[in-house]
Amino acid sequence: MKITKDMIIGEVVNKYPETVDVFMKNGLQCIGCMMAMMETLEQGAKSHGIDMEKLLKELNEAVKDEK
């Protein structure tokens, strides 16, 4: 698994821009806000009521073909 729950949201978006659609679809739309630069995926998911396991699965699916 490339993306883990302890990664910072902003770092995930910067490293894997293809994940933006996944964040938006799951209700984490403030990916460019200041909190995204400090919050982990787990913190963001918890504060927005998002299923962490589902989010991680979808994020990793989005980057699985990256070389």
Image: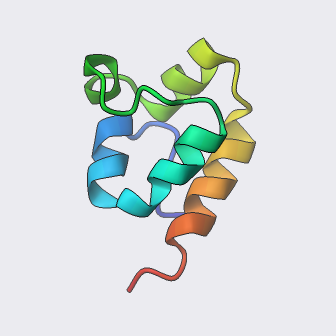
Residue reaching furthest bottom? Answer: 67
Residue 17 falls left or right of residue 62: left
Q: Tag count in the figure?
A: 0
Measuring from the top left, give residue 50's x and y in whole percent.
69, 27
Which residue occupies 57% across, 62% down? 60
Compared with 26, 39 (above or below) is: above
- Which quadrant, please, contains the N terminus? bottom right
The image quarter containing residue 27 is: top right
- Which quadrant, please, contains the C terminus? bottom left
Compared with 2, 55 (above or below) is: above
Q: Observer-nearest residue: 55 or 28? A: 28
Residue 37 falls left or right of residue 52: left
Measuring from the top left, give residue 18's x and y in whole percent.
44, 62
Q: Observer-nearest residue: 34 or 6? A: 34
Residue 51 falls left or right of residue 31: right
Residue 8 showing in the rendered view: no
Which residue occupies 58% across, 13% down? 47
Compared with 41, 20 (above or below) is: below
Measuring from the top left, give residue 58's x and y in whole percent.
66, 56
Which residue occupies 64% across, 42% down? 25
Compared with 22, 52 (above or below) is: above
Q: Report the coloring of the rendering.
A: rainbow
